[in-house]
Amino acid sequence: MVMTNSLEGSLWRRWDLHLHTPATRLANGFEGVGTDTAWDRYIDLLESSPVQAFGITEYFGCDAFFETQERYGRKHPNGNKVFFANLELRLSESISKSGAQPHLHIIFDNDPAVCGHETLTRLCTNLETQAADDSEVRLRCVDLDTPGKIQAATVSLDQVLKALRDTFGNAKPYLLVFPANNDGLKSTDSNSPRKVQLADRIDRTCDAFFGNAGNRDFFLRTDRYAAGSGSSDPKPVLSGSDAHSFTDMERLSGDVAGFPPTWIKADLTFRGLQQICFEPADRVFIGAEPLVLMRQREDGTKFLKELTINQLETYDERNGRWFKNVDIPLNPELTAIIGNKGSCKSALVDILGLLGESRQETFFSFLVDGPKSKKFRQPGYAENFSAEITWITGKTERKKLDERADPILPETIRYLPQNYFEQLTNEIEIEKFRNEIEEVVFSHVDESDKLGKGSFAELEEFKTLQAKQEISILKRRLRELNIEIVRLEEQASPRYRLQLQGQLNAKSEELAAIDAAKPKELVKPSQEDAEQRALTAELEQKTELLNSLTEKMQRCVEATAQVKVEVQQIVSLQERLMSLKSDAERTILELSPQLDALGLDASAIFSLTLDLSAIDSKVAAIRAQLAVLETDSKLEWSETTNLSAFESLPDQRRAHAFVSKQIDGLKEKLGAPQRQYQSYLERLASWQKRREEISGAATDSKPDSLRGVEAQLRYVDEELVQVLSDKYAGRRAIVAEIFESKLKVLRFYADLKRSVESKLERVRSDGFSIEIDTSFVMDSDFRRKFIELINRRRRGAFREAQDGESELTRRIAEANWNDVASVLAFADGLLDKMREHNGEPMNISDQAHDVKELYDFLFSLEYIDARYECTHTTEAA
């Protein structure tokens, strides 16, 4: 029994919905017409062909379809071919200049309960014909019992539609298919309004068209009708072999010129066929092979084949059956999982994410056991089930459902859970404000030291502005450096190296898979006539030219990208210089009142000049270079055009398309063996290109290629330690500069201390004194801020609140905040503590919510403040 409904959904298969049988009633070129020998040969050719579904065609009748079905079932009872009846009719109406009468095809539902022998016979009885000469002869289709009668018979479109209504009522278990070329729709006499109107009516009435790939774009347009006739629906185009002889049946191979194969993405049912009317662009492909099938063959490690889920043998089902013998074949073009709430959609994608080592496991919604959501990973459930995925290559991955994704292994499935998106859309960034510096008793400051300011805050701002600006600049440098350090530390971790090794193994598997998919060698045809030899030679010459254009076009793409990078870089440089000039002018403007008050002329002190002429010239030169690369000359192409002379990317692309079209034209003239050989060469070239992408070029390999990953491993092993050490040294230098700038703020407080000391002497007496203390102190909120940066759900030195607080208290007490070396030792000590816990190496990235944010906090020294404090002492009597 033929499996017409695929469990994995719609798949690409070869269909040929227009071929005749050895019993065809017109133009029968089969040897041994209608004999059992001819039929046996015919049936065997159908069975051995790559075509899966056939439209068995007959003029003004359907008996050939039923005979084909019966003979096929008898000769190949386990065969998997599918057949549809194709009733071919000659229309009495003509739309071409020649007056030729086009043929209309009706392809019927192959469900015998819908379009069985009795039903289609009734249709042929209902359908009246007329003679080609418009005589009064009116024969029904069932009465056309001689070739002469069939040759003379025609039907009008109205007669066809009436017979279909009389037979099927409002049901429509059929598709109307009209030719696109020859005497079909594309031959419409545009000078005849009547024929144009009739052609538009036929277009509206029909469901699909027989044609070739060149007709596709036209019938997908929605403006096909004559002006004022309304918009047209996109319609599918199908190519058929129109076989009338055993020689014609060679067309089923797909290699005969003028008869390209048709691929349809659908179940092998009439309902599946109907889907092409709703999605004509996506479900029909005319050509050697749809892209996805080529990608499956060459990139089998990227396509899932099957998911299985089952309970362990030891599970007693006390918590429900859940998954038992679940076997889900997966479509290579799977784009959506549809189902009602509670239909296990989230379970399915979570399991796929787990098996694919997803990095988003914390956002799973089914495989969860958290404090706020106890689902399938709570005790008694997930540990009793396992799942396995199988890739197209046959490789499998298996896990128990209570296991975790391994961050060391390559992520083979990218999964973006719904919870991940919800968090992205719901998070509200809350700005953190620094605590204001406490107000010191400003009234004790000598009037001469107040500098005309009305409060301590104003005076502080005035005196420390420059130092704070320096700190702001240094913090920006620190943040940029921390980005680099975090990236390098990740690369230096054992986990990263294991990830690279996993990528290397995966690339090796991809290389093995592509090597296994190498096209089977096909020997170049040796027997060629002079015409075929000339065509082959020209085709080889054009192919060599096309390869050259492809390489040149790739270099041009890279050059264009590089020039655009240079444009962006120089534009950014311009903007930074202009911003620098604006900042300087604004600073001079701000300082002018102070200079004026001191009797100083700003123009005599500052000389600000910014000459961008050299940069402007560079910009003009780069933009001119980009214009050359991007200009479309819009030239007309011909055989005499020197296609290799063009420099711009649009011209090269058009040249590439021009040569590709020439090659397609030459291939159409080749015989079947030569076409098969050329198809082999194309597959081989595609295979070689894909293999090089996976393995990487000998020089300048891409990072995701095999050689690229090997180069990353060498870098990690041989260079990374020194690079990271240099970055740490750079960070320590920036911290020292930040500390020095903070000392300037501290000096402001020291100056205030000297200003108020004389007044403090007045309140000093025996046994009682007031002192001013200026020093660096730690922000009292440091503990809270630091702990907030730690992921308390992960194991580590600061996970436990009590132990973490004790450790912090000890380290804070030991630090000397007035000494930069001690401050650096404090920050580094916290990180060292996180790197090792109970003698076990740990990753900081596993303990911090955001490693860069942690580094920015610790090394920016925001938690160290210069304080001005009053203290008093009282001596006992």
Image (cartoon, helix red, strand yellow):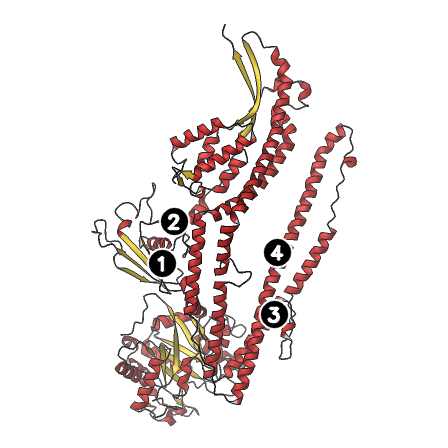
Foreground pick, 137 / 269: 269
N-terminal of the pair, mark 2 or mark 4, is: 2
Distance between the Cα atoms at labels 2 and 4? 36 Å
N-terminal of the pair, mark 3 or mark 2, is: 2
Classify 369 as above or below 82. above
Q: Total label count? A: 4
Seen in the image, is 646 located left or right of residue 42?
right
**What is the residue that sits farthest to the top in this orientation?**
877
* Residue carrying label 4: 565
| Rendering coords of residue 862 (x, y %) | 54, 33
* Residue carrying label 1: 338
N-terminal of the pair, mark 1 or mark 4, is: 1
Mark 3, other Cα within 10 Å: few <14 / some 14–19 / many ≥20: many
* Residue carrying label 2: 361
* Residue carrying label 3: 652
Say which amino acid is labelled 2.
Glu
Query: Which mark is in front, 1 or 4?
Result: 4
Tag 1 secondary structure: loop
| Rendering coords of residue 618 (x, y %) | 70, 55
Distance between the Cα atoms at labels 3 and 2? 46 Å
| Rendering coords of residue 680 (x, y %) | 46, 76
N-terminal of the pair, mark 4 or mark 3, is: 4
Say which amino acid is labelled 1.
Ile
| Rendering coords of residue 33 (x, y %) | 34, 92
**Which quadrant holds the N terminus?**
bottom left
Distance between the Cα atoms at labels 1 and 2? 22 Å
Image marks 1 and 4: residues in contact by CB distance under 8 Å = no
Q: Is residue 33 visible?
A: yes
Classify 756 as above or below 599. above
Image marks 4 and 3: residues in contact by CB distance under 8 Å = no
Tag 2 secondary structure: helix
